[in-house]
Amino acid sequence: MGVHDPRVELQIGSSWSDVTGPVRMQDGIRHRRGRGSEGARVDASQTTLTLDDPTGRFNSRNPRSPYYGQIGRNTPLRYSVDGAAVALSIAPGDVGRAYAVNHASFAVTDLDVRAEATPVSWSGVRSGLAWEVCGRCGSGDASWWFTVNDTGTLTLTWSADGTTLLTATSSIPVPFGPGERAAIRATLDVNNGASGRTITFYTSGSISGTWAQLGDPIVQAGTTSVSPGFASLQVGDVANVTTQAVGRLIHAVQLRDGIGGTIVANPNFGAQSSGTLAFNDSAGRLWTVQAAAAITSRRTRVVGEVSEWAPRWHVSGNDVRAPLTAAGVMHRLNQGRKPLRSVLTRGIPSLAPDLVAYWPLEDGPESTQAYSPLPGVDPLTVTGLSMASDSSQPASAPLPTVKAGARMSGVVPPHTASDWAVHLFVHIPTAPSTSGAVLEWTTTGSPWKLWRLLFGPTNFELQADDGTGALTLAATGSVLPYDGTWWDFIVLVIPTGADLLVIAGGYSNLLTNTTAGRITTIDTKFGAAMDGTGIGHLMVFGSENPGDGAYVQAYRGEAAGSRVARLGLEESVPVDTWGPAAEQELMGYQRPGKLLDLMAEAEAVDGGILMEDRQRLGLIYRGRSTLYTQTPILTIPYADLVELGPPRDDDSRIRNDRTVNRLNGSFGQWVADEGPLTPDAVGLYDDEVTLNAAYDSQCQPIAQWLTHLGTVDEARYPRVRLYLHKDPQYIDAVTRLDVGSIVRVTDLPANLPPGPLDLLVEGYEEEVTTERWTLDLVCSPGSPWQVGELDDPDYGREDTDASQLAAPLTASATSLSVATMSGPLWSTDPADCPFNLDVNGETVRVTAVTGASSPQTMTATRAVNGVVAAHSPGDPVQLAIPSIAAL
């Protein structure tokens, strides 16, 4: 089937079965992924193919089929291709490795470990966790291991004695984006000659390339050593090290004894044949593939679910076919998915088994009972309450307010009679004129049987009596100001020997010769004093430690990717996030809504991409910062493309006046004030969007960023086509290409503006047949995502406010006279050269700048972008790559 060797598998039972043979390759395999156009929401991926099925093997209703009862709706389908670079492959969610048994040479003195890898993302994935590159760690026998953190920083962990762990982490993250193949290195100088040890980290384009130091060396007090240990050397997931199961390709690893010293292990997975299970490296070590890892050149293009099995055949009964359509997990998640309940209703039940009774009180306006989400807990009976009338608690659906004469009553299931706690969310808009009860409950304790919680004009009161009406406790405590906020008010009792410690609000007291018993009923009668008070989320704990959790504030202030990941975890949908949470926008209150809609809220606030995982039935959130200033995954000359464009140079995407409203908050606005697409230049193109951001202060920066994206002054090339059957050298890069990656087109013809042309991949469609593999990329301009980066030689420069040629410039002259009209002069420091300038459309590379005043003289190489022209005094001069401020 050619260089691509497509493979189609169905998950039959718990294993994948190859069904490529019956695939009608003359009809082709078609696959669609990502966005259909710029700015659209990502759709569920779709894969279509047809199987020859003369025996009815793929008829899910046919009892003669060997797959009968094992295939049906949403049977997983996996489509993969061959032809990429060979590597040790570990899929997301899997735990796999290659290992070499312990060898005497592994007992190194100074440590030097290097690796070349392509992870799904160099940062993010799962917040707070790291992924392993390689290392040695037995049970109670730690030696060392090398990991990459969710922040993109590198960590080296080692032990001198096999038990006590020592660590060092790079001061800055690696400069690599998702899908980028690169190399990392860590060295440990156990004795730096100054009574200490030094750990240094490096990066490179490849394991054999030139190494650049990553951040500052880490100098720690005290000399050290590396425990020789007995564990095998493992690449991938290191046994006995708890991190996360991240999808990654590992191409090669080196372990050296001494910094730059003798190579003692050198597994080069890229030099092996695809499918190799064991091999000897150049240092003589035998490597064996274990668990879910594989040495392979095969790459998964999609994992989907077959939602329909509809065989087709000719009226004669011959030519039976089974056309299949497999959709990504978004398809199922969008099918009739009911809205998720409120954050409180979803979070509080997780506190079981300590939680013995819970009534959210989020029922509708005509309810006569209050439902409990806890099994075995009967509803509360409610009369006279104004149900669903208070919507001011952001973590909740609308809650009831109290009216004079209202009542709620119910039974608390039996629980251990030792200690207990009662929670009630209370919202008192204004101070009451007299005291009134908001909660009453009965217990089996002694001497107190009946308890009441009351609020008055300036404080609260906790009362209890022995069940006969004789008051035995009347404790008062201060309350928070009646400022309209919601309180999670707690009454907590803790037995202490023969005594009982009572804690409520600002009150606590140790009461002698008392028992807590257990709570048996809730029976609250409301008077006129509490009229208009909001109540909800009544909880009874059989524990002194209720632990309410972050959901009480509806996760306000949560990073966008963290919200997507948490929602996925709660709904059992695998989610990876790409990019550090610290670089993502913060979310407002999580309100009830459908799962994908809540995730899309996070996508909209942060400006990233919510998409499907290609390697499993799950989702990926690609944070906005991972789209910034990327190294192109695919660089391709124009001549190798089948199609580029046709270009669109219209106003369909212009937005030069953006307003961002915060949901239930303030707003921010930004109007483009410079460049060729300002309202003064082309007219007003405005729009408005409402986002669920955490704070009003986020609105204007987001509006400014959206205005930047909406004023890109270049033609758009929405579609790029290439034939991989003709140019298989691009297969490896294409298999690493994903939604949000950058494609660079070079060597543009004379009829187009000089390049290179950077395009952001919004999505793609591909078709594989017996003879062809066609890839159509849906693209948008990549230039607005090339933002300023500190100390970067191209993107870390500041432009002057306005510069121009001060003298004529012939087509061949290499000396420019440049006048700065406003802003700082150009730097004359040789260290700041070279850099590229745009001179009225021609790119020149400046190698020296002289002159302490304007005009200055610049020495330059001409026609860097292929434009050869003469220029006149007054022609504009500016940085060829302007430093754009990121959001």
Image: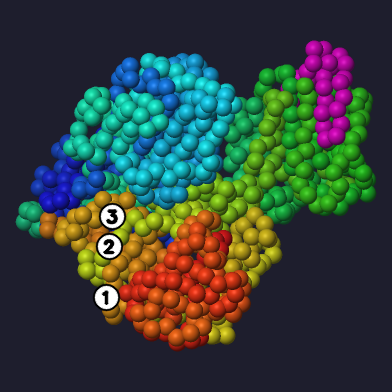
Residue under label 2: 636
Residue at the limit of the structure toward the top, as seen here: 497
Residue under label 3: 734
Q: Which element is circle 2 on?
A: strand
Q: Which is more N-terminal, label 2 or label 3?
A: 2
Nearest the camera: 639 or 415? 639
Q: Position of residue 86 (x, y in %)?
A: 24, 41
The answer to whether the residue labelled 3 contacts the one labelled 2, judged by CB atoms less than 8 Å apart, is no
Q: Amino acid at mark 2?
A: Ile
Bin the neighbour count of mark 3 within 10 Å (Cα to Cα): few under 14, some 14-19, many 20 and up.
some
Q: Which is more N-terminal, label 2 or label 1?
A: 2
Instruction: Identify which residue is drawn at 78% across, 38% down.
Output: 489
Q: Which is more N-terminal, label 3 or label 1?
A: 3
Q: Give the magenta-colored segment's residue range.
A: 495-520
Q: Where is 357 relative to 320, above or below?
A: above
Is 517 one of the magenta-colored residues?
yes
